[in-house]
Amino acid sequence: MAVVFKKMPKLYLLIIFCGVLFAKEPVKYGHLKGNVTDAKTGLPIAWVDIYIKELNRSASTLEDGRFKFIDIPPGSYTIDFLRVGYSEIHKHVKIATLDTSLLQIIMAQNSFDTEAIVVEDHREHSHLQKPEAELSGKDMRSRMATTLAETIKDMPGLAEQNNGPAPARPVLRGLSGDRLLLLENGQRTGDLSTTSADHAVTIEPITAERIEIIRGPLTLMYGTNTLSGVINVLRNSDKSMENNQIRGEFSGGYESVNHGYASALNLEIPVNNFFFYADGSYRSASNIHSPGGSLKNTNLKTINGKTELRWQPDWGTLKAETAIYTSDYGIPPAPSELGHPNGVDIKLRKHTYSTAAAIKQPARFINDITFSYDLTDYFHEEFASSGFRDAAFSLISQHLSANTSFSNFEIFQNIRSGFWSGMRQFEAGGLTNTVNSDETSLAGWVYFENDFGNLKTSSAARIENKTITPREEKTDLRVGRIRERSFTDYAAAIKAQYGLSKDFFFSTTLIRAFRAPGIEELFADGPHLPSYAYEVGNADLKPERTYGIESGIFFEQHDLDFGLTAYYNRIDGYLFSQNTGERSWKRNDLFRYQMVGLDAVIRGIEFSGNYNLTKRLKLSSGLSYLIGNLKETMVYSDPENHDNSDFKPYKIKTNESLPFMPPLKATVDLTYDINNLSLTYLAHIAGRQYKPGRFEKSTAAYIVHGFNVEYFIAGTSLLHTITLRIENLTNETYRRHLNRIKEIFPEPGRNIKFFYKLYF
């Protein structure tokens, strides 16, 4: 790690030095304050959540409706005002140097937060830093589920891949695993969820404040493997401490399909220049039920908690955090007697420790500079039904980063740069034979925007090195020569947005991404019972290099908004674990899966739209469709059974479908609001997957109906929201293509959910 730290500052210091040479004048901050009142009564509104997207800063109005933000770098920002029972307001403002901007916000009662009012001309504002999609407020409460993947699966472009209810993982535009970066408050999760379908994502949705889907040049601030995008879960954004008021939330939920319940509590305590935050949650569920009966060994129990202490003097911010996540969950029995007829139990624990410091205006050309460090200690064990520990995995991750934002220079705006380094110590035990290895990474990046009037652009570039060093070098018959591998490459992206009118704009993004293979993709060699496979790596794998383009048209008005996007991604050396169709001679109850790298293409379209049919009736819809094909031919010969005359080499042919590609998906929601009550009909539609991957079976089309009811009670100091949701209203029997156990068990049956949230 010391070698990595020695190399890190060089590129970063060069960027800062260049900034010194060309900087014109020091940055001087501005401030923002105002109040929020009711359009009908003129009275102040408390409990309004205020969020500055570009800075990830938030605040809430006091009982007299006042709010305040201090020390905001000059520039243009989108500020969201959200309150249950009122129309959302998205205000575009400009913060000037050494000036205090005053806002008088008037919010109209709308029974529920179903309409959004955008204030100011779109031509004066850029969508370049706006998330492609986000989930918060009422939508978050109504979709709250056991896992992150289940919570967001109905958003356009997203799907859920699972191996039982607990280890579900999001799929974005057909990509998952290490091709989709999952973050919590901008930091990597430090778990092993990217390496196998049975490893859980260690993010608890019930403690989330909002979920953002980020695409385009912004993603390169987080990694080079961000072709499909970044999912960032905001657990507690940086709160404004000017209001000096204790706030908190309590959540509780129940669902009938697995007799599961969950509860969570968080507190925010500001005292002068100090801010204390704490949250905790508990979730428990029994075996899941479907029209086919109960699915054995799908119970789970999860405990999650976090504390943060922040000091905010005049010069900046200093904070320290600690978090814990533990989970005990089951993997259902294997299909067709593969590996574990009674299921596997997994126990995991994760401890995270982090610290960060932000310095305001350390030099005349720098807005701010932020340093952060985190350490995550992750461990999980896998037990067969006999109680014997089949496998264990340990991962210690460390990350060190520095990010800087610069003052604008000529046509360049929102200039940012940073460096990032990481170290991962991976160890495996039990039946798995993956070689213990160390991984180090080093990256530098830059991001900036240009404003040419109606045409606005953003650009980013990132260069990254990843080195994997096995603690034992050897030659393996199946894996190849196990030795140190080092990968260095770059990713780059540019996005152009052209305003055709104040409501209508066109956007195009070009991206070149890069993904190096991981430790288990290179060196795995052993049975992995929860994933029903004998996994074999490939020590000679090359990195993926991807070239993508997407274009879209977007329209936004008060009563109507929609977006239509098409994309095309060419992936050179697409890495995936291919079912060979042969059983391993070491474990004849498991099929052997071999890592391969072949050229592939993924192309698709997405649509989302909202239309206010009347003042109280709103129609929302979404559609996603993609096709993934291989563009390279490979003949597979068996290294284990090369003397076996019964084995016949098979050929992977050009235009074969990629494995686990989601079929056509569509959603239709019809919402009616009356006073404090909101009623929503839900329809989720999936097409037939008629192009399954090798050894996969086609799945039939289906439509699933649902119904959602939400009611709120607002007081002077308390705000209650109550949500009742019925999923699979008609108890339909259906199978999702991305469910790895679909052959033995259909999707859950009728599910009645209850969710309560108290704001105080």
Image: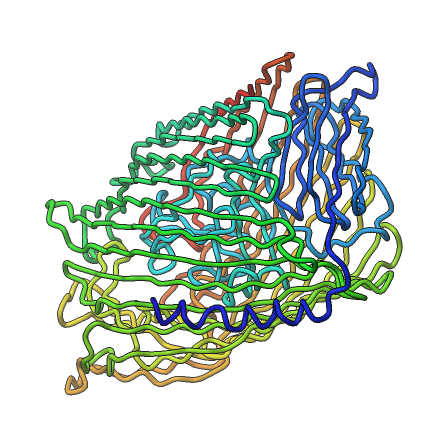
When the figure is inspected, residue 683 is found, relative to residue 61, above or below; the finding is below
Q: Residue at x 54, y 50 (%)?
A: 686
Left or right, residue 308 beside residue 639:
right
In the picture, the quarter occupied by the N terminus is bottom left
Instruction: Return the residue found at the far top.
Output: 716
Residue 724 drawn at (x, y percent): 53, 24
Instruction: Return the residue found at the far right.
Output: 501
Residue 445 drawn at (x, y percent): 57, 67
When the figure is inspected, residue 197 is found, relative to residue 722, above or below; the finding is below
Residue 6 drawn at (x, y percent): 41, 71
Q: Residue at x 58, y 51 (%)?
A: 213
Residue 138 visible in image: no
Out of 177 and 426, give the one closest to the viewer: 426
Residue 25 visible in image: yes
Out of 112 and 16, give the one closest to the viewer: 16
Where, by quadrant of the figure, is residue 705 drawn? Answer: top right
